[in-house]
Amino acid sequence: MNFLELQVTLSFCTIFLLRMLGMFMILPVLSKYGMFLEGGNNFLIGLAIGIYGVSQVIFQIPFGILSDTFSRKKIIILGLLIFFIGNIISANIHSIWGLIIGRFLQGAGAISGVCMAFLSDLIREENRVKSIAFIGMSFAFSFLIAVITGPLIVQYFGFFSLFWVSAIFSLLCIIIVFFSLPCSENFIVKKNRSTLDYKVLKFIFNKVFIRSYIGIFFLHFLLMMNFMVIPNKLELSGFCLNNHWKLYLITILISFLSLFFFIAYCKLKYVLEHIIEICIIFLFFSGLVFIESKNNLLLMIIALQIFFIGFNFLEVFLPSHLNKQKLYNYKGSIMSIYSTSQFLGISFGGIFSGWLCSFLSVIEIFLFEIFMIAIWLMFSIFCKKNIFSLKK
């Protein structure tokens, strides 16, 4: 990488890290502390988790289209300002509905797809996978920091302090975007390129892209479902909530190191070609171990470790697979649809799991997860076979 590419990569890594902390810090604590909010119940807690994804779904594609027409840098700053307002509202309205409104506005700053498109503008193709891999690691690192600091911040400063911290982080992101990212006219796509007609829609929804859209949807759907049930299951296994961060720290670090060594040293062509399906099988196996664990803490830890290895690998390889394709002049739209699928998974996973927890047992929820993973695996294999047949 040259100096500009390194600067851009590190800037986006920092932006994604700080911004995603605002979403992730709430996950380990909301299923417990949400019950203490005025009007709190399982369904509304799930809605508070998932509503972030709902607003991302609504605004992600419009932001992407705007970024194909105007300066990506200005659109990113606009999204971060909306995210800041959402944090302020979440911190000041002390009820479950206030939290839901604030989380909706947090998600309305839907800039993930725009950021990935801007990254593709600035990074040469031969360095793009490395850059995306670093950003994927920043996601994993933000999750690691969040699950450690979230419970600690709540313990010492209160639940709503999470949103004040997130508001400060959003301001830091605006400063980074303003001073660290270039705004050259060379990186602004002309207006006539963003016209959406039948041929364009057919291109951005072809089998190759749909495979990635569906994959990121299922991945985050499963993440949200797991965080509605795993904290309670760990407590039933005798693991105190205040110590959960230690377990998350170890499992995520191991998965992070596994990813690093895989990217650095794996040269097996067959494994690289089928890495997405291999990771889905990891998630399927983790669901089986979760079911067999019952209240066995050791099996729970093994299942969690397998899940995070599969999750972190897919966070890196799904977008890198997408960026290997020729995106032409529709990077903003394609990456925004990808991010929309991601947050659609977050919204459905949060809301649906909150609803399921009202009447299903933990084992039944894990059985449902395994069923969803099986559908995902079959769909991915089917799309891949069709892609290969088209190439031939």
Image (tube, rainbow, N blue to C red):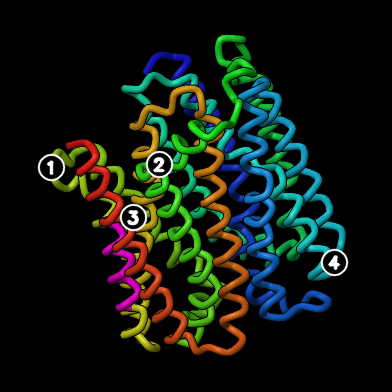
Q: Nearer the viewer, mark 2 or mark 1?
A: 2
Which amino acid type is marked by label 1?
A: Leu
Alpha carbon of mark 2 to alpha carbon of mark 4: how far?
45 Å
In the rendered view, tell whether residue 55 sits above or below residue 353: above
> Which of the numbered marks, if any, corresponds to residue 94?
4
Q: Residue at coordinates 30% horizontally, 47% vertically from top-left? A: 259
Give neighbour class at mark 1: few <14, some 14-19, many 20+ (Cα, 10 Å).
few
Lower sequence index among marks 2 and 1: 2
Lower sequence index among marks 3 and 1: 3
Lower sequence index among marks 3 and 2: 2
Alpha carbon of mark 2 to alpha carbon of mark 1: how far?
28 Å
Q: Quadrant of the N terminus?
A: top left
Q: Residue at coordinates 58% horizontally, 33% vertically from top-left? A: 114
Lower sequence index among marks 4 and 3: 4
Which amino acid type is marked by label 2?
A: Asn
In the rendered structure, the answer to whether residue 129 lies left or right of residue 79 reads left
Point out the residue furthest to the top here. Answer: 185
Magenta segment: does it hold 283?
Answer: yes
Which amino acid type is marked by label 3?
A: Ser
Q: Which residue matches tag 1? A: 268
Stretch in magenta: 279-289
